[in-house]
Image (cartoon, grey):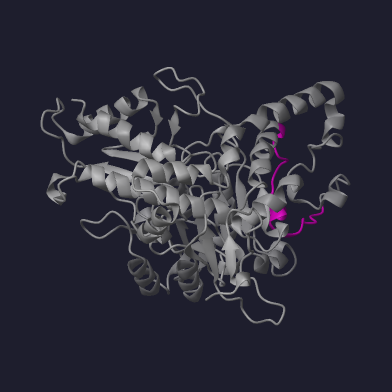
Amino acid sequence: MPTESSKVEVNSACAEFGPGSETGSGMPRPDKEVVYQGVKIGTIRASDGCVEVTDVGAALEKLTEHLGVDDLEGLLGCLDDDDPLRELRDEFVFPQSLRGDAGDNNKVIYFLGNSLGLMSRRVKELVNRELTKWADLAIEGHFRGDLPWMPMDRYMLKAMSAIVGAASVDEVALMNSVTVNLHLLLVRCYRPKGKRFKIMCEGGCFPSDHYAFVSQLELHGFTREEALIELYPREGEYTLRTDDILAEIDRNKGSLAVVCLSGVQYYSGQYFNIPLITAATRKAGAFSLWDLAHATGNVDLALHQWGVDGAVWCTYKYLNSGAGGIGGLFLHQRHHHRNSGPDQQPYLKGWWGHLESTRFAMTNEWEPEVGAAAMRLSNVPMLAGTAMMGSLEIFSKTSMTQLRTKSILLTGLLDRELRRLACPSDDEATEIFKIITPEDPCQRGAQLSLRFQAVPPGAAEENVTAFTLRVHRQLEARGVITDYRNPNLIRAAPAPLYCRFADVGDFICRLQSALFDL
């Protein structure tokens, strides 16, 4: 039996462990058990401090037995009653649905945190405070108040560093948007030389990433056809196999300059094996970059421990900073000494990347900030930074261990019930939709992607695309907020910070009604 010190009770917000934690003797810690509501459901890996639940179905069965319930409604009720994150739901404002449920968080089901997170109630208070400060103090607001504007990003770096698994705040910068930050990293890391000039990405990556890759190639005189390696799933499959990715890296190891994938793929919801792919990329002599727009705040990360060279992310999805919110950038500390000096990596510079202590001397002599901060171009927009602060205050009340643990169970329940609904006869040929997101909880975050593939008998629509659009509109009319992606996909993402287990049961009922109310 494990000792008490090898258990982590996720009912406590302090159950957060940094990446690569070690004992005082220098020996690696053993994996710790993850105990949720009195039941062991998985482990926290000693190697990187991340939660791992290999069999979510078995975990749900154990919880059902432990809680003494015999139906779905009873299970959902018990899980919500003892949910350690339960009170955080009330810190968010729920939107009005198309059927008129204005902000009623008991009626509106918001499964769209993968696209835009909800607004925290604290944001209005903080933004109004800063607007008042602007009116009362004008330029002095840069230096006064609870959140001085000039150094405001420093107030958020500790929380953000914990969310992405940085070794210190020096590895993280808050600035710009995700695509601008990706360009900045590519300028620094994509330095084609000789035969090493290619960029590798997933073929179905988010368009703005693709545009960034192609434009960087063009700036160096290359074309997409000759220098961009695009990875696609095997025929008949919807996600990339890790072994296939590793094989392609090895096959192209002599020509790769950069490998840049999404941490969580926006369309399929696949969570890539970042540490394995990063290790293979670095072994091949290329830079390992990641777009973590759909991963940050969604899955627990250990960027420093995994050896990632650089990463970017937005903050308006699972981090709830508001549309167009400030972006984030990670630069591993092994590159920090190359901000200046004889080994300097060429990169784009701006005023806010200059050392703060001499910034206003205006000498035009470059003195970089330490670490990732040297890559900042301009100061953080006052209102965007304030909105980000409102969300991070809520994250400080929990941990990525708690969030990831609940998310695995929440999405696992949704996955199980959706599969039962999609194929009630156990005949795959009759499936109305197929979940293309991996069933393995280690290969997905909160999101499930439902690919519709059949029009049920009696439906008015003649094709699957029209039927999928109709189902999406019917869900909206029933107070369910998800999103539609061309040509026949609906994405559902129950963010654990504000979604309940009961939302799963309600979603299934409303989806069933939308599917069969013909």
Q: Position of residue 273 (x, y in %)?
A: 44, 64
Q: Is residue 390 above or below residue 496?
A: above
Q: Is residue 13 above or below residue 119?
A: below
Foreground of the two, 347 or 79: 79
Q: Position of residue 479 (x, y in %)?
A: 39, 26
Residue most extreme to the top: 100
Q: Quadrant of residue 172?
A: bottom right
Residue 20 makes an appearance in the image: no
Residue most extreme to the left: 457
Residue at 72%, 67% in the rendered image: 337
Residue at 52%, 41% in the rendered image: 317
Q: Quadrant of the C terminus?
A: top left
* Number of marks in the rendered image: 0
Q: Position of residue 446 (x, y in %)?
A: 44, 48
Residue at 13%, 45% in the rendered image: 430
User: Magenta segment, which residues?
Assistant: 365-382
Residue at 35%, 72% in the rendered image: 247
Q: Main secondary structure of the magenta part?
A: loop
**Is-magenta flag for residue 494?**
no
